[in-house]
Image (cartoon, rainbow, N blue to C red):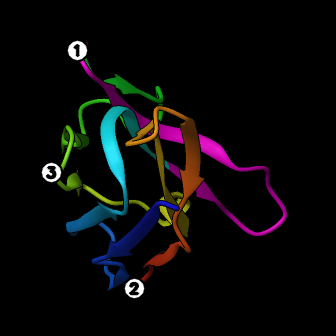
């Protein structure tokens, strides 16, 4: 079983910054993709950013130029640096990991989520 643990959420004023972290643990052979998704009240969960191994990061249009994803390779945490935050960025942010266990079975797992609130 893979455990994904997020941290770094909180309350920030508009224009501020936060950095989210997600660390994976368990019997992991390799991680092929890690990403951040978010879900605001009354809305569907949506992709924020993801990074594959190998590959270039992929961002939602709404966060391009403001958010940066890094890390996420096997045994390394994945980070989401969020700058110039807006009230519409308020949501629960979830980490997702896709990879292979040491027994070569695949996994597609979610973290428990961390709340990000952007408000003055």
Crowding at dot 2, Cα within 10 Å, few <14 / some 14-19 / many 20+, comes out as few
Q: Nearer the viewer, mark 2 or mark 1?
A: 1
- Spatial separation of the CA atoms under disc 1 and disc 3: 14 Å
Quadrant where the C terminus is found in the figure: bottom left
Q: Residue at x 23, y 14 (%)?
A: 54
Give the residue at the far right of this rendering. 42
Mark 2, residue position: 120
Q: Does dot 2 land on a helix, a strand or a loop?
A: loop
Instruction: Tell me the number on the disc at residue 94.
Output: none
Relative depth, front residue between 41 and 78: 78
Quarter of image, res 22: bottom left
**Which percent across, then down, holds residue 109?**
57, 52
Q: Does dot 1 land on a helix, a strand or a loop?
A: loop
Magenta-colored span:
37-55
Give the residue at the far top of this rendering. 55
Residue 75 lies in magenta, yes or no? no
Give the residue at the far front of this rendering. 103
Residue 52 lies in magenta, yes or no? yes
The reply to whether discs 2 and 3 touch (Cβ–Cβ < 8 Å) is no
Crowding at dot 3, Cα within 10 Å, few <14 / some 14-19 / many 20+, comes out as some
Mark 3, residue position: 76
Relative depth, front residue between 31 and 1: 1
Q: Nearer the viewer, mark 2 or mark 3?
A: 3
Q: Residue at x 31, y 81 (%)?
A: 12
Q: Residue at x 64, y 42 (%)?
A: 46
Mark 1, residue position: 54
Give the vertical position of 5 relative to 57 (above or below). below
Crowding at dot 1, Cα within 10 Å, few <14 / some 14-19 / many 20+, comes out as few
Q: Residue at x 20, y 66 (%)?
A: 17
Q: Does dot 3 land on a helix, a strand or a loop?
A: loop
User: In screen coordinates, is 86 left or right of 38?
Assistant: left
User: Which numbered disc flags the more N-terminal residue, 2 or 3?
Assistant: 3
């Amino acid at each position: 079983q893979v455990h994904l643990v997020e941290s770094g959420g909180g309350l920030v004023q508009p224009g501020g910054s936060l950095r989210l972290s997600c660390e994976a643990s368990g019997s992991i052979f390799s991680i092929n993709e890690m990403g951040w998704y978010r879900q605001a009240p009354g809305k569907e969960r949506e992709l924020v950013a993801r990074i594959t191994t190998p590959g270039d990061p992929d961002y939602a249009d709404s966060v391009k130029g403001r958010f940066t994803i890094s890390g996420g390779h096997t045994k390394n945490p994945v980070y989401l640096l969020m700058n110039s935050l807006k009230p519409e960025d308020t949501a629960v942010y979830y980490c997702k990991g896709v990879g292979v266990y040491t027994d070569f079975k695949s996994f597609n797992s979610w973290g428990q989520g961390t709340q990000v609130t952007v408000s003055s």
